């Protein structure tokens, strides 16, 4: 029997709502529906509403609202969330240059998969990735929908610096990293659209539930968008 | 107005205010001062609002040249602050003349000191806050030769007496941090939970504003250390596969995939801000009621300082 979502404390100022323990678009949809329901009815003391793959964290000020009362309210919101309509998905098409210096792992990935690079690029660039949620550091979008044919492990030794906009994958996950940072993913291309800018609001273009594709373009085309926000590519 | 020139930025000195809560869903930690009580008191002493930006400096060696006649106050850990090599009192506003040199000559107690200047430090705001968070491209640590400016909006008179002694925290070493267990305490064996709650841990040198890595007895899991990634609350005690806990703090990543055995209560985060690598700490589990009472007491202490200053 399905017991339904579990509510647990996560310290004195946050609680966690756990849905089914798997990475799945349907489970994530329930997480986002609950997030939207709470946002539309935000009581005093509720601070941040943080969806992830299969959990929702709600942070709060315990001097304004106590855990048992908030947990009870969450139960009510869970019931309402089942009937809520989610906003339509937005699709970002981020022009991406593949291979060469922009995709240092492309050759290795083609060897590991025994596929020609045109096919790796073709499959990847035609995939619509779902933004499960935003997290890690500086607006990392956790992307799902990685095609089965392109499953490769992480690098044994992570690169110490991967430039912002690099597009890559490992295991069942994909990402386009938002700022220069270390990473153990396999990077096969790069977009020059700006994915993170703390001087504007919102600082990152995506929200949970959006979709992203990385259409293949020439280096010249890719460089033309340098400095433009990813929001221009809806 | 130009307030100071940075002669020596010290071990690590940054501008911080009370942070930028509300952006975790964009992957951005709230940051903010590592000891909220001390920073707020420093501001109140010089007539600022408690949330004004202050300098947060670590250990020693920060040296500033005053470019103007100023009022300032230093609170937090005792890092032996001096003016022209003469010690001056902490937890009290002091007047500084143009040409004076302020330096922090060595740590005696605590780990981080806070320097507030009358008017509050100015500096670029990112997403509503002046808190520096370099990894997120929001400002940098101080550099030699940098000029620090203060806002000249005068707010309240300066309170030049020391605040009552009983309001000054003592930053005793070997703190016991109160925690609420969970959210994944069921992923640890009874022995693992016992280890966590009964052992002494040492703060490792690989600790910073993102997190404190601890060394000590390894905590036993029951079914692996990994979970599907989810949001991380401030103060979360993550235990990766090696069994050694990491406390996630002010500049921590906002999501991750390791089991969390417990969460340090909000009222005890300031204590962590004054605990330095090499020092030891312990954990004790408490209820939500105890955590809330502790937080209320902490807020009351700020109110008491405000009352003392208002006379």
Image: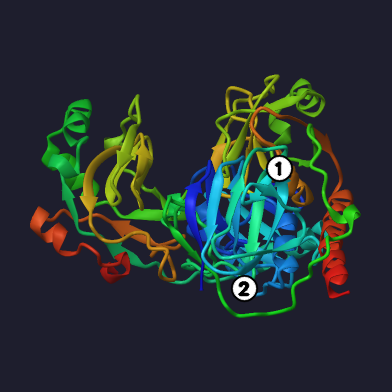
Where's residue A110, x and y in %? 18, 32
Give the crowd class for mark 1: few <14, some 14-19, many >=20 residues within 10 Å.
Answer: many
Q: Earlier in the sequence, mark 2 or mark 1?
A: 2
Q: Position of residue A44 (x, y in %)?
A: 74, 72
Q: Quadrant of the C terminus of chain A?
A: bottom left
> What residue sits right under mark 2 in the picture?
B119
Q: Secondary structure at mark 1?
A: loop
Report the chain holding disc 1. Answer: B
Q: Is residue A126 above or below residue B303?
A: above
Q: Secondary structure at mark 2?
A: loop
Q: Give the percent coordinates (x, y) of residue A81.
A: 62, 66
Residue occupied by mark 1: B274
Residue at 70% in and 52% down: B35
Q: With B271 as the anchor, is A25 left or right in this view?
A: left
* Foreground of the two, B139 or A51: B139
| Mark 2 surroundings: few (<14), some (14-19) or many (≥20) residues within 10 A | many
Q: Nearer the viewer, mark 2 or mark 1?
A: 2
The reply to whether dot 2 and dot 1 touch (C-beta < 8 Å) is: no
Residue A12 seen in the current view? yes
Visible residue check, residue B234: no
**Which quarter of the picture shows residue A162?**
top left
Inter-mark Cα distance, 2 to 1: 26 Å
Check the picture and name the quadrant holding the N terminus of chain A: top right
Q: Position of residue A2 (x, y in %)?
A: 67, 46
């Amino acid at each position: 029997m399905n017991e339904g979502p579990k509510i647990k404390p996560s310290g004195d100022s946050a609680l966690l709502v756990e849905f089914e323990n798997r990475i799945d678009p349907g489970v994530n949809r329930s997480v986002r529906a609950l997030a939207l329901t709470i946002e539309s009815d935000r009581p005093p003391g509720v601070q941040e509403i943080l969806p992830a793959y299969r959990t929702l964290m709600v942070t709060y000020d315990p001097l304004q609202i106590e855990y048992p009362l908030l947990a009870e309210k969450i139960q009510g919101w869970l019931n309402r969330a089942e009937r809520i309509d989610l906003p339509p998905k937005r699709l970002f098409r981020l022009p991406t240059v593949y291979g060469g210096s922009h995709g240092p792992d492309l050759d290795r990935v083609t060897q590991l998969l025994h596929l020609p690079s045109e096919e790796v690029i073709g499959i990847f660039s035609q995939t619509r990735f779902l933004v499960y949620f935003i997290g890690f550091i500086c607006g990392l979008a956790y992307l799902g929908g990685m095609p089965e044919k392109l499953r490769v492990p992480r690098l044994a030794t992570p690169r110490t610096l991967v430039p912002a906009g690099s597009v890559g994958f490992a295991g069942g996950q994909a990402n386009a990293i938002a700022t220069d940072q270390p990473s153990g993913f396999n990077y096969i291309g790069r977009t020059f659209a700006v994915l993170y800018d703390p001087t504007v609001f919102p600082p990152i273009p995506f929200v949970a539930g959006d979709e992203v594709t990385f259409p293949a373009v020439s280096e010249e085309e890719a460089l033309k968008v340098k400095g433009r926000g990813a929001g221009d590519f809806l | 107005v130009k307030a100071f020139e940075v002669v020596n930025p010290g071990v690590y000195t940054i501008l911080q205010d009370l942070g930028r809560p509300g952006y975790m869903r964009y992957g951005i930690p709230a940051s903010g001062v590592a000891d909220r009580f001390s920073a707020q008191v420093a501001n109140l002493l010089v007539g600022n609002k408690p949330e004004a930006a202050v300098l947060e400096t670590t250990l020693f060696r920060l040296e500033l040249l005053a470019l103007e006649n100023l009022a300032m106050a230093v609170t937090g850990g005792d890092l032996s602050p001096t003016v022209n090599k003469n010690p001056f009192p902490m937890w009290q506003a002091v007047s500084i003349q143009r040409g004076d040199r302020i330096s922090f000559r060595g740590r005696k107690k605590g780990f981080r000191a806070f320097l507030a200047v009358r008017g509050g430090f100015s500096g670029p705001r990112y997403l509503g806050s002046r808190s520096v968070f370099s990894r997120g491209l929001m400002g940098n640590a101080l550099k030699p030769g940098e000029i620090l400016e203060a806002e000249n909006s005068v707010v309240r008179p300066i309170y030049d007496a020391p605040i009552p002694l009983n309001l000054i925290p003592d930053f005793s070493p070997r703190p016991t941090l109160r925690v609420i267990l969970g959210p994944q305490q069921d992923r640890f064996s009874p022995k693992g939970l016992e280890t966590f709650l009964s052992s002494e841990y040492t703060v490792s040198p690989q600790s910073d504003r993102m997190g404190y890595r601890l060394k000590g007895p390894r905590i036993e899991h029951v079914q692996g250390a990994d979970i599907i990634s989810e949001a991380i609350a401030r103060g979360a005690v993550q235990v990766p596969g090696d069994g050694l806990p990491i406390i996630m703090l002010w500049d921590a990543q906002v999501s991750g995939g390791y089991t969390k055995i417990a969460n340090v209560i909000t009222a005890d985060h300031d204590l962590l801000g004054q605990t330095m690598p090499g020092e030891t700490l312990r954990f004790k589990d408490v209820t939500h009621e105890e955590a809330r009472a502790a937080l209320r007491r902490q807020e009351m202490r700020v109110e008491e300082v405000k009352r003392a200053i208002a006379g």
